[in-house]
C-alpha cells in the first residue's frame, strides 16, 4: 500500500487521519488543523506519538509540554492524555493492540 492512496478520515474536529491496521497494531498519520484539540482521554492501547511537523502541546498524566519536529512521546495504556495543535501539525501515532474504533 502507499500512504498517498489512503483516504483521509476526520476522526474528530480538525484531526484528519490516514489509518493503517494490521492484526495487532494501528498507525495513524494525522494532518491537524491549528487550534484543534483532542480532549483528555485514555484507552487500553499503548501509544507512541511522533511530531512530524509543527508544534503540539500535549498533556500526559497531568504534565504538559510543547513538542516539536522529531519529538516522540510514549503513552502507556490507561494513561490520561490530550493535546492541542499550536500550529498546523503532522503527527504519527502507533497503537498496540489495533484501535478497533478507528477501523
Image (cartoon, rainbow, N blue to C red):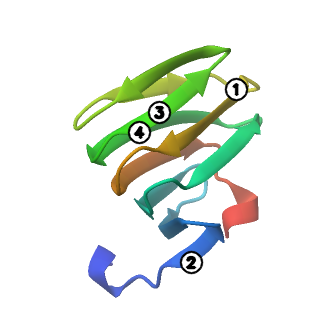
Q: Earlier in the sequence, mark 3 or mark 1?
A: 3
Instruction: Find out whether the residues at labels 4 and 3 contact each other: C-beta distance under 8 Å.
Output: yes
Vertical order, 54 against 29 (above or below): above
User: Residue at label 3?
Assistant: 57
What's the CA distance linking mark 2 and mark 4? 20 Å
Q: Nearer the viewer, residue 18 or 57?
A: 57
Instruction: Find out whether the residues at labels 2 and 4 contact each other: C-beta distance under 8 Å.
Output: no
User: Residue at label 1?
Assistant: 77
User: Residue at label 4?
Assistant: 56
What's the CA distance linking mark 4 and mark 1? 21 Å
User: x and y percent of residue 7 in the render?
Assistant: 46, 85
Q: What residue lies at 76% left-to-right and 26% top-to-bottom? A: 78
Instruction: Find out whether the residues at labels 2 and 1 contact each other: C-beta distance under 8 Å.
Output: no
Vertical order, 78 against 21 (above or below): above
Q: How many marks?
A: 4
User: Residue at label 2?
Assistant: 9
What's the CA distance linking mark 2 and mark 3? 22 Å
Mark 1 secondary-structure assignment: loop
Tag in front: 2 or 4: 4
Mark 2 secondary-structure assignment: strand
Image quarter for residue 32? bottom left
- Using the rendered image of the protein, determine whether residue 2 is visible from the camera's viewpoint: no
Mark 4 secondary-structure assignment: strand
Q: Earlier in the sequence, mark 2 or mark 3?
A: 2
What's the CA distance linking mark 4 and mark 3? 4 Å
User: x and y percent of residue 59 in the render?
Assistant: 58, 25
Crowding at mark 4 (Cα within 10 Å: few <14, some 14-19, many 20+): many
User: x and y percent of residue 83 in the render?
Assistant: 57, 38
Amino acid at each position: 500500500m502507499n500512504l498517498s492512496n489512503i483516504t483521509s478520515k476526520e476522526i474528530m474536529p480538525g484531526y484528519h487521519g490516514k489509518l493503517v491496521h494490521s492484526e495487532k497494531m494501528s498507525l495513524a498519520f494525522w494532518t491537524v488543523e491549528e487550534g484543534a484539540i483532542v480532549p483528555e482521554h485514555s484507552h487500553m492501547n499503548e501509544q507512541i506519538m511522533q511530531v512530524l511537523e509543527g508544534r503540539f502541546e500535549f498533556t500526559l498524566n497531568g504534565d504538559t509540554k510543547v513538542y516539536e519536529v522529531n519529538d516522540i512521546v510514549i503513552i502507556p495504556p490507561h494513561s490520561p492524555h490530550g493535546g492541542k495543535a499550536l500550529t498546523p501539525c503532522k503527527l504519527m501515532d502507533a497503537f498496540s493492540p489495533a484501535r478497533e474504533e478507528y477501523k
